[in-house]
């Protein structure tokens, strides 16, 4: 709390950035909670191991496209890439499985590949920030972001290929 009492332009800027990041995290989590709470979730009272789930983690050998740019090219061909269902899939597939019935068919399907990307030391905040600033279909921009991180590009390509494959039906 002492930092909040210190005055100065540097301290204020940091405080604003932290507040903005915290607000973004709360809004993102709130959206997922609202989406889960608004659906009919018949497995809500069951232990996680007993809940039915249609989502299946895709093994590396099952992923058809394992390249960052090839996965991006697939996304450029989607006609429903901005639809709610597509955006839900894009958000849920690389993240841990959600117990919501609304996301069961794709939630967590690529989580193991996202974990591998997060574990890769060359996947730095700078690379992530660069990739987030690119449009999902700006393949040249994505390629430039990963130029100096070839190992990160490999694991991100597997993750993106998995997500593109899992979400193809919702997004095409």
Image (spheres, helix red, strand yellow):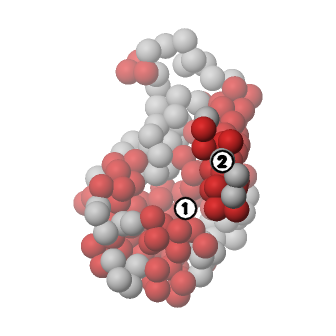
Spot occupied by residue 170 in the image (x, y as percentages of width and height) = 62, 56
Q: Is residue 82 visible?
A: yes
The residue sitting at 54% across, 46% down in the picture is: 92
The C terminus sits in image quarter: bottom right
Answer with mark 2 or mark 1, whichever residue precedes in sequence: 2
Disc 1 secondary structure class? helix
- Circle 1: is it few (<14), some (14-19), or many (20+) Cα within 10 Å? some
Is residue 117 placed above or below 79 in the rendered structure?
A: above
Disc 2 secondary structure class? loop
Q: In the shown orientation, is residue 60 left or right of residue 79?
A: left
Spot occupied by residue 77 in the image (x, y as percentages of width and height) = 61, 76
The residue sitting at 59% across, 81% down in the picture is: 138
* Disc 1: which residue: 168
The residue sitting at 45% across, 64% down in the picture is: 125
Spot occupied by residue 79 in the image (x, y as percentages of width and height) = 69, 70
Is residue 34 placed above or below 63 in the rendered structure?
A: above
Find the distance from the CA under tag 2 to the CA under tag 1. 51 Å
Q: Residue furthest top?
A: 45
* Disc 2: which residue: 6
- Circle 2: is it few (<14), some (14-19), or many (20+) Cα within 10 Å? few
Q: In the shown orientation, is residue 19 left or right of residue 50?
A: right
In the image shown, does 164 or 115 lie closer to the viewer? 115
Task: Tell me where residue 155 sits by quadrant.
Answer: bottom left
């Amino acid at each position: 709390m002492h930092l909040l009492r210190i005055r100065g332009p540097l301290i204020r800027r940091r405080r604003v950035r932290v507040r903005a990041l915290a607000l973004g995290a709360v809004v993102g989590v709130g959206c997922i909670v609202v989406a889960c709470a608004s659906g009919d979730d018949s497995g809500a009272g069951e232990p996680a191991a007993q809940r039915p789930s249609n989502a299946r983690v895709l093994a590396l050998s099952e992923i058809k496209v394992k390249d960052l740019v090839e996965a991006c090219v697939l996304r450029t061909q989607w006609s429903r890439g901005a639809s709610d269902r597509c955006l839900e899939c894009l958000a849920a597939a690389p993240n841990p499985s959600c117990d919501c019935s609304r996301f069961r068919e794709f939630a967590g399907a690529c989580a193991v590949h996202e974990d591998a990307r997060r574990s890769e030391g060359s996947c730095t905040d700078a690379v992530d920030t660069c990739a987030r600033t690119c449009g999902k279909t700006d393949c040249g921009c994505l390629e430039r972001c990963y130029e100096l991180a070839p190992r990160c590009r490999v694991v991100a390509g597997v993750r993106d290929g998995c997500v593109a494959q899992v979400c193809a039906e919702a997004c095409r």
